[in-house]
Structures are given as C-alpha cells and as structure tokens.
C-alpha cells in the first residue's frame, strides 16, 4: 500500500495551530471588543470556529485511529484493492504527530499482525504488510516454505482463490503465525528466488540463493511479507522495518465502494 500521508499530517497540524491561534485571539481579545449584536468577522467564522473540529480530527487521527485505502493486491486475499481500513495508532505506543517519535511504550508487533509503516526506502510513503519475523528471529523463505528459527510454519492448502481482475485461479493456503491464522496465495509456477533485491541497511544479515532467502532480523526491526506471496514487494526485496517506522496495526475494513460486503471484515 502506498499513500503520501505525512504531508497531510503536516497540513492538518498547521491548520490546527492557525485555527487555535485565531480562536485564542478571538476568545480572549476581540470578542470582548464586539458588541453583543455584532456579526462575527469572516476570520472568526471560517477560522477560529473550525478549531474544535480540527482539534478532534487531529487527536483521533494522530493517537487513536487513522484511515487508509488499499491500492494494490499485495495483501490479497486478506485485503483487497479498494478496501478502506482502520489502523489502531496506539497499539505499538504513543508517538508524537508528524515527527512519529515514540514517547510512551505500550506494546510491540506480534507475528501475524498486519501493520502499516513508513516504507524504509522512502518514509514519505505508507506500506501495509504482515509481520513474519520479530527482532532476533531467523526467517527463511526457501522454495516457498516459511521457517522461523528452524521451525516450519504450519500451512494447509484450502482450495483456490479466483482473482476477478486477472481472471486467474491461485492456490489458497491457510498459515498460522503465532496465534494468528490467515489466508495467503502462492503461485506454483512463480520462481522461488527473489528478483530485483535492493541495497538496504544491514543487507549482510540476509543470504540469497536460487531457493529464496534467509535473514537474521536485527534488534529493533521486523521482517514483513505480503499475503499474496508471489506478488508482493516486501522485506525480501527492500529489507527490514525499523520500529520507528511503525504507524499502527490494521484491524478493520470500514468501506469498499466496489463490494459493500467487505464492510466489517478483517479482524
């Protein structure tokens, strides 16, 4: 998922500061100078009066829940193109708006969590993937089989998934990561090796070969993958997600214009 939300957060913050300044000026200075029957000036009507609304939106979006839209198919079948999802902003700690600096520790990602994060190669973009490896884990994805710390991750074939856009059937599996069971897609005829690997920080902790990749997840970082395993640009390609890049945990589909049955789905 890609969406340039940092600029919006900054714009919202600037609007909050400006409207707050106008509200304070009117409330403590100019309102006292107006007669009771005087009409409010335009700067009060369209500036200061919006301060409470902007404040509520800013607090909700910065500390509680933020909406995102899914524009790509990397998380199919869990999340579909066009899903509008809600993201819990405080699950992994309270962070300062705009700066995204954690000030209160609350929790950490667990295997199986679907997380939104700042894309490491370009933090102005937001991505969404599933947490596979935690700090200190050895994650191996070889011949399309996932192993964590030497233990194969339980996986079971459950029919096929039909992609209506591609008019294509893909084998559907159910995998268990930690306490989370989730569906995923694996294309039998897609190559096992990882193409187009980028140069990323601590790349020396990953070993690539014709069968796939093995990575030792560094401290303070996470290894993430898409549920559409053969159609996802993820940690296999561009590396680990630092803790400071985390935005929150996705948990709810609140709308989809193309499929109203999607509303209320996910977990």
Image (cartoon, rainbow, N blue to C red):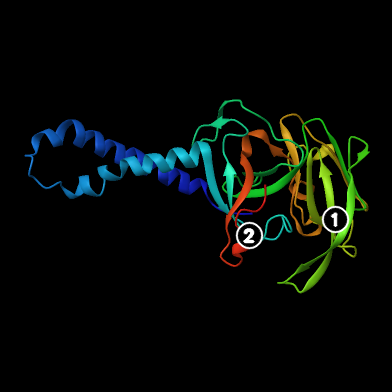
Picture quadrant where residue 16 is located: top left
Q: Which residue is mark 1?
A: 173
Which residue is painted at 70% across and 60% down in the image?
73
On screen, residue 251 versus residue 54, left or right, reads right
In this view, the residue farthest toward the top is: 104
Q: Earlier in the sequence, mark 2 or mark 1?
A: 1
Which residue is painted at 53% across and 42% down in the image?
65
On screen, residue 267 versus residue 66, left or right, reads right
Which residue is painted at 61% across and 34% down in the image?
91
User: From this viewpoint, is residue 155 visible?
Assistant: yes
Badge 1 marks a residue whose secondary structure is strand
Badge 1 density bin: few <14, some 14–19, many ≥20, Cα 10 Å: some
Q: Is residue 200 above or below residue 104?
A: below
Q: Is residue 109 above or below residue 164?
A: above
Quarter of the rendering occupied by the N terminus: bottom right
In this view, the residue farthest toward the bottom is: 167
Q: Position of residue 256 (x, y in %)?
A: 58, 61
Q: Which residue is mark 2?
A: 262
Badge 2 marks a residue whose secondary structure is helix
- Rounded to the nearest whole Å, what is the CA distance between mark 2 and mark 1? 20 Å
Towards the viewer: 149 or 157: 157
Q: Is residue 161 above or below residue 144?
A: below
Towards the viewer: 186 or 241: 186
């Amino acid at each position: 998922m890609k969406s340039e939300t940092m600029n919006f957060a900054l714009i919202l913050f600037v609007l909050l500061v400006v409207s707050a300044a106008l509200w304070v000026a009117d409330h403590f200075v100019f309102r006292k100078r107006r007669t009771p029957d005087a009409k409010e000036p335009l700067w009060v009507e369209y500036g200061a009066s919006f301060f409470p609304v902007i404040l509520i939106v800013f607090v909700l979006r910065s500390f509680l829940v933020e909406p995102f839209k899914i524009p790509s198919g990397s998380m199919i079948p869990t999340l579909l193109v066009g899903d509008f999802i809600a993201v819990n902003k405080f699950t992994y700690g309270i962070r300062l708006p705009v700066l995204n600096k954690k000030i209160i520790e609350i929790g950490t990602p667990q295997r199986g969590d679907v997380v939104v994060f700042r894309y490491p190669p370009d933090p102005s973009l937001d991505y969404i993937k599933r947490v596979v490896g935690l700090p200190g884990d050895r994650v191996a994805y070889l011949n399309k089989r996932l192993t964590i710390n030497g233990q194969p991750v339980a996986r079971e074939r459950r029919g096929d998934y039909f992609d209506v856009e591609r008019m294509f059937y893909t084998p559907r599996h159910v995998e268990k990561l930690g306490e989370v069971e989730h569906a995923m897609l694996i294309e039998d005829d897609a190559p096992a090796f990882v193409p187009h690997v980028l140069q990323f920080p601590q790349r020396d902790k990953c070993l690539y070969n014709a069968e796939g990749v093995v990575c030792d997840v560094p401290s303070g970082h996470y290894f993430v993958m898409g549920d559409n395993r053969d159609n996802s640009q993820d940690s296999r390609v561009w590396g680990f997600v630092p803790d400071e890049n985390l935005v929150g945990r996705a948990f709810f589909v609140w709308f989809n214009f193309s499929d109203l049955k999607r509303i209320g789905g996910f977990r």
